[in-house]
């Protein structure tokens, strides 16, 4: 039933031009590149997209443009989370009108809402649309840690098809999958992709899939074939790249690497810092030799 939601889903980056406006031509190029590489779908307007640094109208336009460029070829999930239920519902309806397969939302944050308030937030959204929801569990950034019991209250409803679990709590991931084996569980941290698969994840949503999807597609394939040691070699290779990224910042680093690859992503939104020329050169010189051999 949920087969089309399995696999490797890049969390799309948002390219900006020299005027700090969304560069839709480059977004189209990025989607074409990743489609040609064979990714299974796209996760749009999430953390990697700098969603909470975009205006509300920019978020709507980004969701619309990504769907238009995809043209129905790959599975599309739109992250529509806002602190405001009203705004989240508006984005959810917009994603539905654009033809998305599902929506996803981080829990409302900042005000330390009670679980009952968070629960109503999610149910208000799914009651407003006819496409399913993927819960986005990212406690490190949202400050909201959804327990297995919490998540069960959503997954027991057919309108909630899974969880994007961006957490190193793989015990919880395993419990989600054991309790709801038919639902989709996504791994969230790229550096632990193989670990997530081993604990029951059906696929993953990640930032670095924007520039090295081949590695993760190959890991996914090898894991499915039971070739775990070979998959682990590639995970270690990806992790060497990620270790370099973490020195400089994931979003600016991913954009710098893609720009080096010929996809001019521009900078990041303030208050993020862009890389200095020195940092960019250091990052590129460190990661390109690792990436040049592809999935070997």
Image: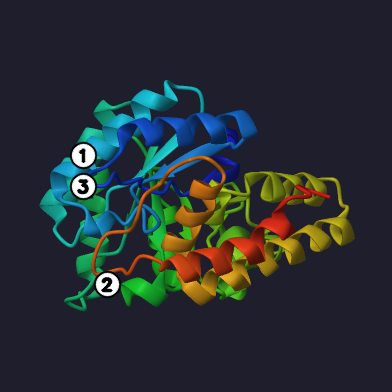
* Quarter of the image where one finds residue 251: bottom left
Which numbered disc, 3 or 2, marks the residue that appears first in the sequence? 3
Identify the element where label 1 is drawn.
helix
Give how far across and how far down residue 204 sits, in percent: 57, 52
The front one of 35 and 271 is 271
The front one of 18 and 240 is 18
Residue 4 visible (yes or no): yes
**Which is closer to the viewer, label 3 or label 2?**
3
- For the residues labelled 2 and 1, the Cα–Cα distance comes to 28 Å
Which mark identifies residue 19?
Answer: 3
Q: Mark 1 Cα within 10 Å, few/some/many (few <14, many 20+)?
A: some
Considering only vertical position in the picture, is 65 above or below 242? Answer: above
Considering only vertical position in the picture, is 160 above or below 39? Answer: below
Which mark identifies residue 115?
Answer: 2
Please indicate whether residue 123 sits to the left or right of residue 194 in the image.
left
Give how far across and how far down residue 91 sits, in percent: 21, 42
Considering only vertical position in the picture, is 168 above or below 95? Answer: below
Identify the element where label 2 is drawn.
helix
Q: Which residue is tagged 1?
A: 60
- For the residues labelled 3 and 2, the Cα–Cα distance comes to 41 Å
């Amino acid at each position: 039933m949920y087969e089309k939601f399995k696999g490797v889903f890049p969390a799309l980056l948002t390219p900006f031009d020299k005027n700090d406006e969304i560069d839709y031509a480059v977004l189209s190029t990025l989607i074409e590149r990743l489609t040609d590489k064979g990714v299974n779908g796209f996760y749009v307007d999430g953390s990697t997209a700098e969603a909470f640094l975009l205006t509300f109208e920019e978020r709507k336009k980004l969701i619309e443009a990504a769907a238009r460029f995809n043209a129905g070829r790959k599975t599309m999930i739109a992250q529509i989370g806002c602190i405001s239920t009203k705004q989240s519902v508006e984005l959810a309806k917009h994603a539905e009108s654009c033809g998305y397969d599902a929506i996803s939302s981080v829990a409302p944050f900042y005000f330390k809402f009670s679980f009952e308030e968070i629960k109503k937030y999610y149910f208000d959204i799914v009651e407003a649309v006819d496409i399913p929801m993927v819960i986005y569990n990212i406690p490190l950034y949202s400050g909201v840690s959804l327990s297995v019991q919490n998540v069960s209250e959503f997954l027991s409803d057919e309108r909630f098809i899974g969880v994007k679990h961006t957490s190193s709590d793989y015990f919880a991931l395993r419990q989600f999958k054991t309790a709801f084996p038919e639902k989709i569980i996504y791994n969230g941290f790229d550096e632990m992709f193989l670990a997530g698969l081993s604990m029951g994840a059906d696929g993953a949503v990640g930032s670095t899939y924007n520039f090295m999807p081949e590695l993760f597609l190959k890991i996914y394939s090898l894991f499915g074939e039971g070739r775990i040691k070979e998959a682990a070699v590639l995970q270690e290779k990806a992790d060497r790249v990620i270790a370099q990224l973490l020195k400089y910042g994931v979003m600016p680093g991913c954009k710098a690497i893609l720009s080096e690859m010929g996809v001019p992503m521009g900078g990041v939104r303030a208050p993020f810092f862009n890389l200095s020329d020195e940092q960019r050169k250091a990052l590129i010189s460190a990661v390109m030799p690792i990436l040049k051999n592809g999935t070997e």
